[in-house]
Structures are given as structure tokens and as C-alpha cells.
Amino acid sequence: RAKAEGRNTHRIFDPAMDEAEAGRRDIGRELRRAIAEGGLDLHFQPQVRATTGAVLGFEALVRWTHPSRGSIPPSTFIPLAEETGTIVTLGEWVLRTACSEAARWANPLKIAVNLSPRQFQQEDLPDLILGILTETGLSPARLEIEVTETAIFADMSRALSLIRRLKALGISIAMDDFGTGYSSLATLQAFPFDKIKIDRSFVGQVGSSPQAAVIVRTVLGLGRNLGIGVVAEGVETADQRDFLIAEACDELQGYFFGRPQPIERFASLVHGAAAEALPRNDARAEAA
Ligand code: C2E
Ligand code: MG
Ligand code: MG
Ligand code: MG
């Protein structure tokens, strides 16, 4: 295709485009260096049981602090890494770092890791993950992989076989950003997801948009009837939490419960010194 275009079109010199392209190449190169030289970090965001507030696990979210540009959001560099293929190296780093971190925790909490569409094209992904689990000693039952519909639509039959192989390892699979894709319902029918994560664009509006409230309620019913767990993403207020509890949502995640932060901030949760955070000792759990 690129070849055909090269034959039929004339490249017109466009300084602005040239500059943007050069900038992207710089960032791409700097990202590869950051991966190699320890310039990336993981932050962790708690996922809690809705009824008790007990922490069930964390989602790992990658962070990049550029030496001169400062912190660059994943919404900027993940798509770039995806285009350039750097995502494969980056994703492997995220998986290995998240798993080895979780393996050190005293409490066997879950760890959720995002996988990008391109990683999901890797035929050897199950072997890679199995290798990382073996190497780090993390139990597969504690690992959850989050994928979006984009990852699945590139090649549905391949995605299905990949998901089956991952599940056979004992890993669970969550569908991220549910409701924002093209055909969420068809995807639910065809793929054996353990969990769906309702996108925060709906969750954030349950108090202000009757439509959003209906959509969230409907997705919760869908999950219940299909036997799939539902997580609400982006819970920011007590009102949103109360709505979700009233609608029998299983799990919640969002700034209300904790922002993504370095794991040191959650030391008492993962190592068990903060007894009130554990389900058994949670005062709210007793009340429930
Ligand atoms: P995501 O997987 O849907 O992650 C949730 C995003 O929502 C995170 O943004 C998180 O910080 C943000 N968030 C959580 N709670 C709230 C809330 O209450 N309010 C608001 N406004 N936002 C909230 P973040 O860390 O900027 O990541 C953005 C996206 O970048 C992620 O969306 C994911 O698609 C991608 N990403 C992040 N880390 C990785 C990674 O390690 N690998 C891959 N492949 N993608 C990643
Ligand atoms: Mg996610
Ligand atoms: Mg999401
Ligand atoms: Mg997202």
C-alpha cells in the first residue's frame, strides 16, 4: 500500500508536518531509551468491593517522566508506542514489573494490567505471560488482563483463541472501557470475559444524565444475567458510589477511593499493617 502510494502521489514539502513527524520520532526514540534506562514507572490504583470498600486489587498504570518535558500522559505516548511497535517492549516491561511487584505483597491482592491491541496480536503472548508468572512466582489467579474492543476487532478469531489460551493459564480477562466501542454487545456474546469495566464516561454522569444512569443500570443487569462481574471505572463522588451500590455493582474504581499512585503509598494495604483495609476487619464489612 505504501509502495502504491509512493508511485502515484507526489510528496509535497510541508514544513509543519515535517516538524510534527520529527517530534514524534524524537519522542519515540526517547521512549525506547526510557524503557531501557529505567525512565518509566508504574502507578497503582485500588479496586474495591462496592459494599465494603475493601481493597481487592490494583490496576497498574504506566507513567513516564521525561527528563526535560516532564510527565507525559499515557494517552499521548501509548498510541505512539502502539504505532511504532515500541508497545511490545513497553508492554513486556509493564507486565514483568507489575507481576514482580504484586508477587512481593504480603496480601494476595489482584493485579490488573492493560494490554494494547498490538500486544494482543502477538502469537507468543501466552508463553510470554507464563514465563513472567514463573519467573516472578505470581499465581495466575492474581493476574487480570484488561483489553479493549479495539484489541479484539483487529482479528476476532485470533483474539478468541488467545483469550482461551490465557484463561487456560488461570488468568482472568476484563473488557476495559465497556460501552465506548462499536459493538460491545456482540463482543460480550462471543468472548468469555470474566469482567467488564463500565467506562468512566458513563459512571461520571450517573448523577447528571438520566441516560447515563439507565445505561449503567442496564450494563449491570447485563453482567448479572450473563454471569460476568462488573467494575465501575471513574467513581469520583460518594453519590456515584451510593448509586452503584444501590444498583448492585460488584466493584468500584476511581479517584473517590484512590488515585493511581506509587505502590509505596499503599504499603499498609498490600502488606497488611492497615488492618481496617482488609475485608475481615473492615468496619463497613461488618455493618454490611
Ligand atoms: P484505562 O485502562 O481505562 O485506565 C483508567 C484511566 O482512568 C487511568 O488514566 C486512570 O488514571 C483514570 N482514572 C481512574 N479513576 C478516575 C477518576 O475517578 N476520574 C478520572 N477523571 N480518571 C480516572 P491513565 O493512567 O492516564 O491511563 C489512560 C489510559 O492509558 C488507560 O485507560 C489505558 O488505556 C492506557 N494505559 C495506561 N497504562 C497502560 C499500560 O501499562 N499499558 C497499556 N497498553 N495501556 C496503558
Ligand atoms: Mg484499564
Ligand atoms: Mg478503562
Ligand atoms: Mg481507557
Image (cartoon, rainbow, N blue to C red):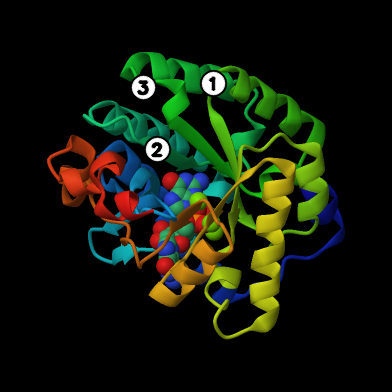
Q: At label 1, which amino acid type do we have?
A: Gly
Which amino acid type is shown beneath numbered disc 2? Answer: Ile
Q: CA distance from mark 2 to mark 3?
A: 10 Å
The residue under label 1 is: 170
Labelled pair 2, 3 in contact (Cβ < 8 Å) = yes
Label 3 residue near ligand 1, CB within 8 Å:
no
Looking at the image, how many numbered discs can be counted on the residues? 3
- Direction from residue 3 to residue 251 in the image, left or right: left
Q: Earlier in the sequence, mark 2 or mark 3?
A: 2
Q: SS for tag 2? A: strand
* Horizontal arrangement in the rendering, residue 147 relative to residue 63 (left or right): right
**With respect to residue 139, does 246 lie above or below?**
below
Q: Residue tagged by mark 3?
A: 138
Q: Kindly identify the residue that appears in the image at 52 percent across and 51 percent down.
A: 250
Please give the residue where the numbered disc 2 appears in the rendered image: 111
**What is the x, y in percent for residue 118?**
62, 40
Look at label 3 and name its amino acid: Leu
Q: Residues within 10 Å of mark 1 (few under 14, many from 20)?
A: some
